[in-house]
Image (cartoon, grey):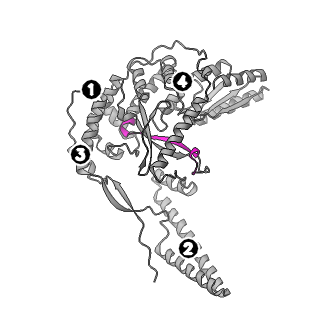
Amino acid sequence: MFLAPPPARRMVSSRFLNESTASNFSAAFDPPCSSDNDPDSLTSQFNEHCLSILDNICPVRTRSVPAVNPTPWFTDSFRSLKSQCRKIERLWKKTHLHVHLLHLKDLLTCFNSAVRDARVSYFSNLVSQSKGNPKVLFNTISSIVSPASPTASIHSVADCENFLSFFVDKVNKVRSSISPSALSLPLPTPTRPIILDSFAPVSLPELTKLVNSMKTSACPLHILPSSLFKSAFQSIGPSVLSIINASLVSGQVPAYFKNAVIHPLLKKPSLDPSLHSSFRPISKLPFISKILEKVVAKQLTAALDEHNIYDSFQSGFRRAHSTETALLRVSNDLLTHSDAGDCSVLVLLDLTAAFDTVDHHLLLERLRDWVGLSGTALEWFSSYLSERSFSEAVSKFKSSTTSLTHGVPQGSVKGPLLFLLYLLLLQHILSEWGVCVCVCVCVCVCVCVCVCVCVCVRVCSVFSNLQ
């Protein structure tokens, strides 16, 4: 008689939340009374208070939980049939009789056909049951046509340290390859009027609406899991509001908000997962820090739109713009100049470690001179970029913490926007040479040059000077 193997299980240490966790936490949460307006002090008090409540109502426990079944359609009947196939296979290898070989082939045909039909039936039922849920439907189809990419091979703290060292050395190598003379080139400095000198405090209804619109995320730095944070926001909202407004008014970002955990993400499924160079670092930040970033990004974007700071050909991170609009612009320019009989040259720039090599001092100069920030608004960005740190963490392993002296975090809310503002000078210089620049969402710079060959040579010299 065939006995099915016991279901696989794994040990997990976590705070196991249930339906009553949010209500119990809200009932126990008593906003700490403090007259201190320092963002760091308010954040520390909030985190300590939340942590003490969680330790009482939902302490960290270690449990044995069922492992995820990658083939839910593979039932005990299929395991029994597979065992029978193995039995006949061993018999045929022992006797070498043709009749046993034919029996094995019949069993294998029956087994493969039954498994295939069960798999088709499983996904058909899943799709039909998810007609009203586009998210589940999309994830189901994606799991079929695009299997999950391999993850980083990390089995110890030493592996985390190796990944961390690789990412740090990679950025340092790129920055050291930049000629010191390129940093001393005379650059144009516009007389941009001040468009934003301070951030306006937000109200509790505005903050509640923003938090409700945000997606939950996982991060080892979370004091409160993001799902519990949103569920209990009616109780913790006033305390969070005090932290956010204290940061906006003082121009200081709490130190807790500036610590990130780096997770290696495979760039393409076809790349070798055993190589460090196949991965890019993605920053995971505390959920509350993303709330502050969204508040700042909303006010900054409104000022950029009002004063028309964006480059006219920028398609990334703009309302009613996307990669599609950039491609339409480039295609239209190529076709228009082709019809006119002009020569066209298309140059695609793929910047190595673009986000990670951003110079903080130059970025602050761009924000001041090219965007028009001053006062506590500029001080806020200076605080946001200074004294940042990060560590590598995968599963239960974590590396040491190191300083982030340059770059904007990939995975942050404002990272892409700050990078595009960092490129304002590049777009200005290229436009001075008659070059049409389209900046896409994927942070590729598409340069369409519709000029004669001699000007193309001059444009190439500009690129070499802009290294």
- Three-letter code, disc 1: Asn
Residue that mark 1 sits on: 37
Nearer mark to the viewer, of 1 and 4 = 1
Q: Is residue 434 found inside the magenta-colored segment of the image?
A: no
Q: Is residue 465 above or below residue 92?
A: above
Query: Going 31% across and 52% down the picture, which residue do you hit?
Result: 15
Residue that mark 3 sits on: 53
Instruction: Calculate the distance from the C-alpha at mark 2 to the C-alpha at mark 3.
Output: 52 Å
Residue segment shown in magenta: 274-289
Considering the numbered disc 4 on the image, is that residue within a helix, a strand or a loop? Answer: loop
- Three-letter code, disc 4: Tyr
Residue that mark 4 sits on: 310
Residue that mark 2 sits on: 114
The residue carrying pointer 2 sits among few (fewer than 14), some (14 to 19) or many (20 or more) residues within 10 Å by Cα, namely some
Nearer mark to the viewer, of 2 and 1 = 1
Considering the numbered disc 3 on the image, is that residue within a helix, a strand or a loop? Answer: helix
Q: Is residue 285 found inside the magenta-colored segment of the image?
A: yes
Q: Earlier in the sequence, mark 2 or mark 1?
A: 1
Query: Going 25% across and 35% down the picture, which residue do you hit?
Result: 45
Can residue 284 be spotted in the picture? no
